[in-house]
Amino acid sequence: MNFASVPWLELAVAIPLFGAFCLARSRDALSASRWCLGFLGAGLVCAVVAWGGFVGGQTVDGTSRFDLLPLLFDRKVFSLDALSAPLVPLLALLHFLTALATARTKMSRFSFAWLLASSALRIAVFACKMPWDLGVLLVLAVVPPYFELRRRGSPTRVYVIHMALFVSLLVAGLVTEGELSLALLMGAVLVRSGTVPVHVWVTDLFENCSFGTALLIVTPITGMYAAMRLVLPAQPPEWVLQGIGGVSLLTAVYAAGMSVVQTDARRFFAFLFLSHASLVLVGLELHTTISLTGALALWGSVIVSLGGFGLTLRAIEARFGRLLLSEFRGLYAASPSLAVCFLLTGLASVGFPGMSGFVAAELLVDGAVVASPIVGLVVLVAAALNGVAVLRAYFALFTGDRYTPRVPLGITIRERGAVLALTVLIFAGGFFPQAYIESRHQAAEMTLEGRSAEKPAPPSHP
């Protein structure tokens, strides 16, 4: 047995899923946390190795001849390509770091079994390409948050209504054909991405669910992946892409403006995410190589930067409770490391020079301006408002009268390790963006070439 013979990709899904069953009845939060880290760490290693084998050419699509699922279903269920290869290990890393950065004071209310199950489902979603297989996994992925809300005694009505709408549109789009199918799938993508007016479930989730769980549900921008797999390959007419782009532009500006005026930190983060997710979707409307490359690059940058930003905000909340932005709290003296991490990851999310989002945002804006100056202007306005929102939140939390705690509230070693890992990725993507941008450019060309190949040839005239 050699390197390529090991089913690394299936193991990246199977190990966290096995861990979820093992910890389902665990009542010791500290022990469950340690076991969860072990299972997620093993899954992360398998995901990284699968990605390395794909990039290094040891495997064609990340699969192995010893994969079990092809024997059961007579087809490949999980595989990698230029689009999904870097996203799978990135999601595995985000789940691992979320578990690593969970404070002991929050462990009793945080379900590590559901975290493992959710990790397995999300990695499975991003490793799947077949429409019906992907549809089933997308439906299954909305189930764990419901049980998490039930376990916490939080209201579930808003989440259930929106996810029922998402599932209905998704299934209806898969069973129908033609433009009706694409319109239904477009609706499912917009609901799952939280665009206006079906964005309420995102803010409701952050208000009623644990911060870590809500962060992992929204940060991967699963709706973008569904669009890339289900909508774009099916040759959608221009009005479908324009519909996605128009609603996304509206959401980007609206959510950015709302993030500026929020007084609750969780709602601020929710609207900040919605604006960034919508900017990523804008690249689908333009469907040029530059704009799609920028959108795909911004997608990965948002996962890293907003993931780190959310983990930092979560760490601050673990020390001071639910945070309000309506007054200056002066927390810098209590925890300067968290202040630095907050500002660093926040600026990275808005494309500050030298960080991972800068090149991606530049490509997206260039593509938008070439396609339509108005679209480019709207994208710039949304990005500027997001920057204002981040700085406003920083000043509200860390400046003002000095807060003097009675106990040390500095960043812990585990939290420092989690944020440091994402910080390394942020600066690596900023100073050495060539490899990542090249992979996103390859994915964009693959997608656009696939669309061109499926276009019917024009009729020949004598």
Image (tube, rainbow, N blue to C red):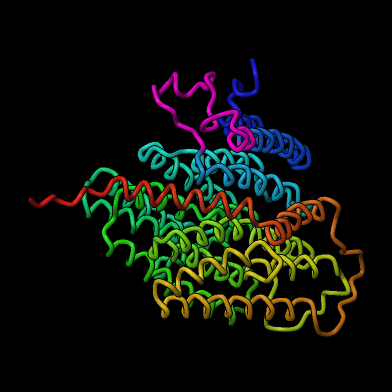
Q: Using the image, determine if residue 63 lies above or below residue 113.
A: above
Q: Using the image, determine if residue 389 lies above or below residue 26.
A: below
Q: Is 407 part of what is drawn in magenta?
A: no
Tell me: 230 left or right of 38. left
Residue 2, percent across and down?
65, 18
Residue range (magenta): 51-80
Tell me: 117 left or right of 289. right
Q: Is 75 part of what is drawn in magenta?
A: yes
Q: Quadrant of the N terminus?
A: top right
Q: Which of 124 and 450 is in front in this view?
A: 450
Residue at the location (64% across, 62% down)? 306
Outermost residue toward the front in this view: 462
Residue at the location (50% across, 40% down)? 81
Answer whether residue 364 is visible to the viewer in this image: yes
Answer whether residue 20 is visible to the viewer in this image: no
Outermost residue toward the top in this view: 1
Residue 388, percent across and down?
63, 81
Q: Using the image, determine if residue 127 lies above or below residue 428.
A: above
Residue at the location (91% across, 64% down)? 408
Tell me: 297 left or right of 444. right
Outermost residue toward the left in this view: 462
Residue 145, percent across and down?
53, 50
Q: Which of 358 and 258 is in front in this view?
A: 358
Q: How many labels does the image show?
A: 0
Residue 403, percent across and down?
86, 77
The quarter of the picture where residue 180 lies is: bottom left
The quarter of the picture where residue 139 lies is: top left
The quarter of the picture where residue 308 lies is: bottom right
Chief secondary structure of the magenta portion: loop
